[in-house]
Amino acid sequence: MTNPPQRAIGIDIGGTGMKAGIVDLETGALVSDRVRIPTPKGATPPDVLRTATELVDLLGADAEGLPIGVCFPAIVKAGVTLSAANVSDEWIGLEADTMFSQALGRDIHFVNDADAAGLAELRFGAAKAQPGLTIMTTLGTGIGSAFLFDGKLVPNSELGHLIWKGDSIEKWAAPTAREREDLSWAKWTSRLQKFYAHVEFLFSPDLIIVGGGVSKNPEKFLPGITTRAPIVVAEHQNNAGIIGAASLALG
């Protein structure tokens, strides 16, 4: 029986940035610098694949031969991308895991980006040993989500696409909406409150975790959110996607 790997590379592909790092799979800690390249405009498959190889190159010699996990802003089933959030529609219906494996020159593990963040918190963070239903939310270019039930990931939840005012709620409540409409933190927090109240009404979670880029500044919005379940900041904040993607190497 092959021993599990001790380290792996995680690549986190987002709507505005692509990030990567080397992760210690025993502790969940980043053991390299986090490298980042802006997501190519339009995020077409050839451009994203080329940028992913550039990220691995930036990690240097320590990255040679390590397994790679990739997380991506799409519904992912059997390695096929079935949607495209904040990336080119050309991704829809592609065998993306095969394409990344060919581009990176080794076998890879492939998952939805919010699901990867959820795995990081499940294995190494706030959801570890948490019973019942934990809902992980990632607040970034859009709103991602991961359902974690009794220690298992339930993949491909898409709470950012709940319909609100006739459109996906993420277009109204994501951090990019605050920036686009020049909202105060207080006004944006009131929108976020409606999102979490709606989610809690539908699913009655036992714990809510807030991750994504905005989780670096929880003091600006989290005190204004009221939920029945405890609501906490992701322990791995914006590195959760990298860590969760890398942890796929554990099986």
Image: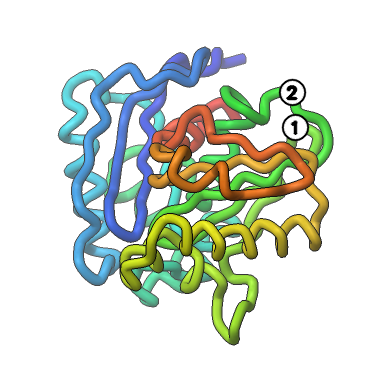
Residue type at the position of mark 1: Gly
Name the image colouring: rainbow
Residue at the (21%, 28%) spot, across then down: 59
Residue on which disc 2 sits: 129
Looking at the rendered structure, the kind of residue marked 2 is: Ala
Which of the two residues, 45 or 218, is positioned nearer the viewer here? 218
Q: Residue furthest bottom?
A: 166
- Secondary structure under tag 2 reads loop
Q: Position of residue 79 (x, y in %)?
A: 52, 55
Q: CA distance from mark 2 to mark 1?
A: 7 Å
Quarter that holds the C terminus: top right
Instruction: Examine the rendered structure and indicate whether residue 41 appears above or below residue 79.
Output: below
**Do the residues bearing badges 2 and 1 touch, measured as CB atoms within 8 Å?**
yes
Above or below, comparing residue 154 to residue 232 in the picture: below
Can residue 128 be seen by looking at this rendering? yes
Along the viewing direction, whichever of 82 and 178 lies nearer the viewer: 178
Please give left or right for residue 242 compared with residue 79 in the image.
Answer: left
